[in-house]
Image (tube, rainbow, N blue to C red):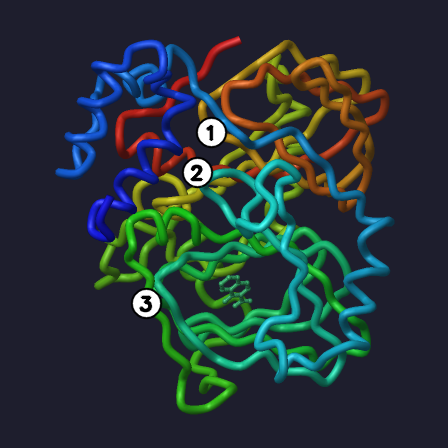
Amino acid sequence: MDAATAPAAKNVSKKAEIYDGSANPVRAEYYERISQRDMTPLWEVLKYLVTKQPVTQCVPAIWRFDEVKPLVEEAGRLLTTEEAERRVLVLENPALRGQSRITNSLYAGLQLILPGEVAGAHRHTASAIRLILDGDGAYTQVDGEKTIMKYGDFILTPTWTAHDHGNESKQAMIWLDVLDVPIVNFFETAFAEHLDSAVQNTARVDNDSLWRYGSGVLPDGTDTSMIRSPVINYAYERVRPILDRMKNTGDADKHHGHRLRYANPFNGGWSLPTMGANLSLLPKGFKGESYRSTDSTIFACLEGKGTTKVDGQTIEWGPRDVFVVPTWKSYAHRVDQQAVLFSISDRPAQEALGLWREGN
Ligand code: 1HN
């Protein structure tokens, strides 16, 4: 075998387990020859390409805040935000270790910013959301809009928007980052750049975008064609009371409880084209019926505690815990006392491609 054919042959031997060429030496020899022309027999791989049901490596998993918080805090003593750029512990799905992802399509991490620190301004094609889990009063700036972050706030950093964070408060702050990095990298569309100054100029303050676009009016001249929400911070103090209104006036959905969607106020669609988020109130004594959908979902508990049964296993969660349910695994939530669950997934991307499905 000469050097030029060696890699191809190696490839075949790697696939030998799949192809079982030993059972049919004539075919095995044929596979070897087509492999040298960078071809492979579809009939040997079709069943892996087109499956009857979604197949995933992703497994159910939970990160309990009480257990991981001290480890996140320890990173604060090990390195500065300057050294780290972003001081984050990546939440890796236990079955996807080494791939910096919590589901096949989404990245998640817990970010720490200490009093007096700045995380410098940059932008990239990946979109981010942040869900504030601990601390009060650090800020983020997104394309010139500065917003103070508080518990439960849902913050957008849409594709290519400049963003920097800083903590002028007296407390450490920890939040959950979720990014569509695996999607951007699947399409091989990643770009990134640093801004000239670490802290961008502040042009707008005080949740300006929420005030402008989150009250059922649109200022004249607003360009409403954006495929993502103009709102940067969906403040928990504005959103949370809506769940109580829903609870007081309507029935809980049998799967999701009283659930709302973080929407793009221009068109009612999802807040970002790649990632969609919900907030759900599970009323006292809620026993959810089994549900599944094709979007592997990341949950974070904001209030109360409960359990989620998924794939024969019971996940017990409490405040600030983050857990994940893989694609097409049936799950059901249960609570004794009232709880509030945030969730996020790649559902908007799946819907845009005509792929999303749900069932029981
Ligand atoms: C990023 O820009 C941030 O800006 C956090 O806070 C986590 C993970 C991957 C890529 C970019 C941030 C990130 C990230």
Front-lying residue, 261 or 309? 309
- Horizontally, residue 260 falls left or right of residue 8, namely right
Front-lying residue, 123 or 282? 123
Q: CA distance from mark 2 to mark 1?
A: 6 Å
Image coordinates of residue 99 in percent, x first then y, are 53, 49
Task: Name the amino acid type tagged 3.
Answer: Phe
Q: Are marks 3 and 2 in contact (CB under 8 Å)?
A: no
Q: Is residue 326 above or below residue 142?
A: above
Q: CA distance from mark 3 to mark 1?
A: 26 Å
Of pointers 3 and 1, the one earlier in the residue sequence:
3
Q: Is residue 172 above or below residue 194?
A: above
Tell me what residue is drawn at x 49 percent, y 42 percent: 262
Image coordinates of residue 229 in percent, x first then y, are 38, 52
Q: Are marks 2 and 1 in contact (CB under 8 Å)?
A: yes
Of pointers 2 and 1, the one earlier in the residue sequence:
1
Q: CA distance from mark 3 to mark 2?
A: 20 Å
Residue at mark 1: 295
Residue at mark 2: 346
Task: Name the amino acid type tagged 2.
Answer: Asp
Q: Quadrant of residue 69?
A: bottom right
Query: Is disc 1 placed on a helix, strand or loop?
Result: loop
Front-lying residue, 302 or 188? 188
Task: Name the amino acid type tagged 1.
Answer: Asp
Query: Is disc 2 placed on a helix, strand or loop?
Result: loop
Quadrant of the frame with the N terminus: top left
Tell me what residue is drawn at x 39 percent, y 41 percent: 270
Residue at mark 3: 191
Query: Is disc 3 placed on a helix, strand or loop?
Result: loop
Of pointers 3 and 2, the one earlier in the residue sequence:
3
Packing grade of label 1 (10 A; few <14, some 14-19, many >=20) is: many
